[in-house]
Image (tube, rainbow, N blue to C red):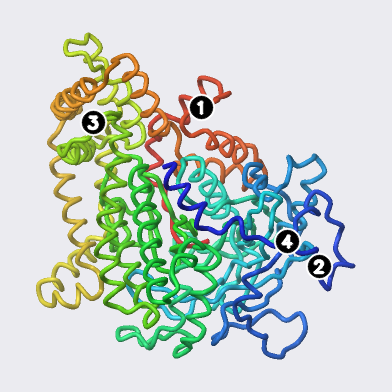
Amino acid sequence: MAALRAACSRSLGLGACRPRPAACCSAAAMEPEARWLAGLRFDNRALRELPVETPPPGPEGAAPTPRAVPGACFVRVRPAPLLRPRVVALSEPALALLGLGAPPAEAEAEAAHFLSGNALLPGSEPAAHCYCGHQFGQFAGQLGDGAAMYLGEVCTEAGERWELQLKGAGPTPFSRQADGRKVLRSSIREFLCSEAMFHLGIPTTRAGSCITSESTVERDMFYDGNPKHEACAVILRMAPTFMRFGSFEIFKCADELTGRAGPSVGRNDLRVQMLNYVIGSFYPEVQAAHTDPVHRNAAFFREVTRRTAWLVAEWQCVGFCHGVLNTDNMSVVGLTIDYGPFGFLDRYDPQHVCNASDTAGYYAYSRQPEVCKWNLQKLAEALEPELPRELGQAVLAEEFDTEFQKHYLYKMRRKLGLVVTEREEDTSLVTTLLETMHLTGADFTNTFRELSSCPVEPESPCLPAFLAKLTAQCASLEELKLACQPRMDPRQLSVMLTLAQSNPQLVALLGGQASVTRELERMEQRARLEQLSPADLQASNSRHWADWVRVYRARLQQDAEGASDSAAWQAERLRTMQSSNPRYVLRNYMAQNAIEAAEKGDFSEVRRLLKLLEAPYGEGEAESADKEHRDSAKPPLWAAELCVSCSS
């Protein structure tokens, strides 16, 4: 992980910063004075080095109209004010990156005013970024920042540069038929998860603030024809850059399947300009090492491929599901970006889908590495001709699978406490562990955490108690039956089965085959469960875990034999496992509890979770024993019925 962080910080160009004196915006005379935020110094390099569209003529102050934006990377926009904004929470660790100290008591009103978009900080230049994307495998054409706005780039005394965004600040030319707003529930989820992922040690964008308001918008959360009014919210997002794979897809010609094209077809001069900007700004070592543009671009793509492989390996090792792994949601600097209907695994299920809108399971947990590799292929295609297609394909074939497997196995060895020796059979040990977790419905996070208490001694009297702790993390019969409930209406299933026999090509084209297969598997599993008693299930789980633990203990003993000091080995094993297996992750039910309280005006649970997730491995806890147990326990049964969709 240290190497991964070092590689990211080296290549993000954080030292190349030229602070400029803060410039007053045109509306400065009408805005309240910034005090706590007054020290932020903007140097908006992206707007200097990339083309910005001159907006078409229209009435002053009118809302932007949806339109194609050819030949530009940004469009100037203006945040739309919110009614009586107020702070839900501030992330002090994130804001400290901007050089901001702990906020004084009076800073909340200031933060609510400026970080909602109701007023602009001196030197900020709001703009929306133009990009395209492949969504669920299909090219969607122009997308762009429909709800996010670039504010500018803050340079710090430490020599770092952070791009600031307001997400949910109002409409842009890329909002299509939407309103450019985000609601409180989705904003709380993104705010908390951005910070949780950072403290887990996973490369991510950051979130500095979450602001709510009395403004409302109408949302149909479950797409069931029952919309309701929800409070508008805005989060401050931070990253070295929000450029993404889809940023380079604006040059794509008309797609063979969808007929859609990017807005800047034929503008290779702009592609070259973007490559020069991204590589020079965020991969300075690549820029310095190559004089030939093709070799430079290949080295850039190689580094993006490696970072993406490392990133998705990190996700898999903490059970994180992104939910919307479109090319427009993948960062060119290897960060987790755009938290929508994400989720962390509770009961381990490799086919888990965290996005209720993804009925075909396109972005299921187990498919994330495959999808990321496919998205990299689309990035390589978008860089052509500046990166010849054959060269891009060769780089991808050489790097992705190798880097993913290497980093994944490195992380898994640490999670299992194998700190001295590496053996080929470790891959099988990990595979059989996950199979056992799947067979028994074990809780992903808690099972890995419990493994640190595995007794290593051959005849340890602690073994039965350890096995009991593992089986306690397995799903109950009630949980498993709930997980196997039908998801499709019986009439719909009957129609799909008939269609699959008469016209399988059409079913495949509609993406329905996977849904039908999973529904049939659920029905079969439910029928088997009906024949089981709780005692039968407990006995079966105990047998499965006893078999795996036998192999695991033998492997631990081999690892211990490779150490010169057994006591030092044991201490290092425990330290490594406890720093690799989190006690706390942002489970959906935890976020839901915080959301429900916040929607009633109580932000204390959001703020408590924010602090808890700053120490996910349990370090430096100040919580009560009851709270500790609640936050690290298996989720309640009702959590399995939570539905998270893209409606935000």
- Could you tell me which residue is drawn at 40 percent across and 41 percent down? 639
Label 4, secondary structure: give it: loop
Q: Nearer the viewer, mark 4 or mark 2?
A: 4
Residue 211 percent across, percent down from the top left: 68, 53
198 is higher (above) or lower (below) than 235 = above
Kind of residue at badge 1: Glu
Earlier along the polypeptide chain: callout 3 or callout 1? 3
Pick the front one: 377 or 535: 377
Earlier along the polypeptide chain: callout 2 or callout 3? 2
- Position of 473 with respect to 36 (left or right) is left
Q: Residues within 10 Å of mark 2 (few under 14, many from 20)?
A: some
Kind of residue at badge 2: Ala
Label placed on residue 619: 1
Pick the front one: 357 or 309: 309
Kind of residue at badge 3: Thr
| Residue annotated with mark 2 | 23
Label 1, secondary structure: give it: loop
Q: Between marks 3 and 1, how big is the CA–CA gap?
A: 27 Å
| Residue annotated with mark 4 | 19
| Residue annotated with mark 3 | 421
Q: Nearer the viewer, mark 2 or mark 1?
A: 2
Q: Nearer the viewer, mark 4 or mark 1?
A: 4
Q: Quadrant of the N terminus?
A: top left
Earlier along the polypeptide chain: callout 2 or callout 1? 2
Q: Between marks 3 and 4, how big is the CA–CA gap?
A: 49 Å
